[in-house]
Amino acid sequence: MIYRNPFKRLYNASAYSIAGLIHALKNEQAFRYEAAVFCGLCLALCIAPLPVMKRLFLAGMWVIVMALELVNSAVEKAFDLIDEGFRPEIKAGKDMLSASIFIMICFNILLWAVTALYGAQA
């Protein structure tokens, strides 16, 4: 479909993105957990004595976790269309996607710990 009006395209793309977020919040437990953590982190950042850019950086790093979770969920759904039974190749793919989220969560824990210890100095 070719859009002659770029604003219509932007509107449609935004609507699809919002529909994806709503779907993830309704159907993906891990995404709901990560969204809840994000809300808690944002509350903590509101009271933290940190520069605005550091607050944005810390929040943004958790947003990456959530974005990876969306990618993970989407690819897992595609894998399930290929074969819902056990296949070692599909399991490996799902495990690697999960590992990408795990790495980002570990990095976030380290980042928040260093920030808590050193505050605005770090």
Image (cartoon, rainbow, N blue to C red):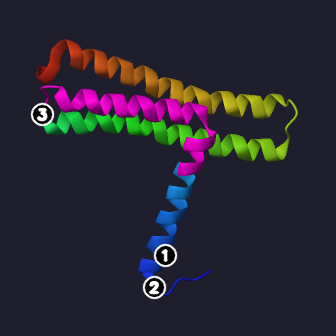
Query: Which secondary structure lies at badge 2?
Result: loop
Image point 12% across, 33% down: which residue?
51
N-term-proximal mark, 3 vs 2: 2
Image point 59% across, 43% down: which residue?
26
Q: Nearer the viewer, residue 76 or 24?
A: 24
Query: Which secondary structure lies at badge 3?
Result: loop
Image point 54% across, 37% down: which residue?
69
28 drawn magenta? yes
Instruction: State the residue position of label 3.
Output: 51
Instruction: State the residue position of label 1.
Output: 9
Q: Picture quarter containing residue 35?
A: top left
Residue 84 place in picture, x, y as percent: 85, 38
Magenta-drawn segment: 22-50
Q: In the figure, 80 relative to 115: above or below?
A: below
Residue 39 place in picture, x, y as percent: 36, 34
The amino acid on which the numbered mark 1 sits, given as a three-letter code, is Arg
Q: In the figure, 121 relative to 19: above or below?
A: above
Q: Quadrant of the C terminus?
A: top left
In the rendered structure, are the residues bearing label 1 and label 2 in contact, judged by CB atoms less than 8 Å apart?
Answer: yes
The amino acid on which the numbered mark 3 sits, given as a three-letter code, is Pro
Image point 45% across, 28% down: which residue?
104
61 drawn magenta? no
Instruction: State the residue position of label 2.
Output: 5
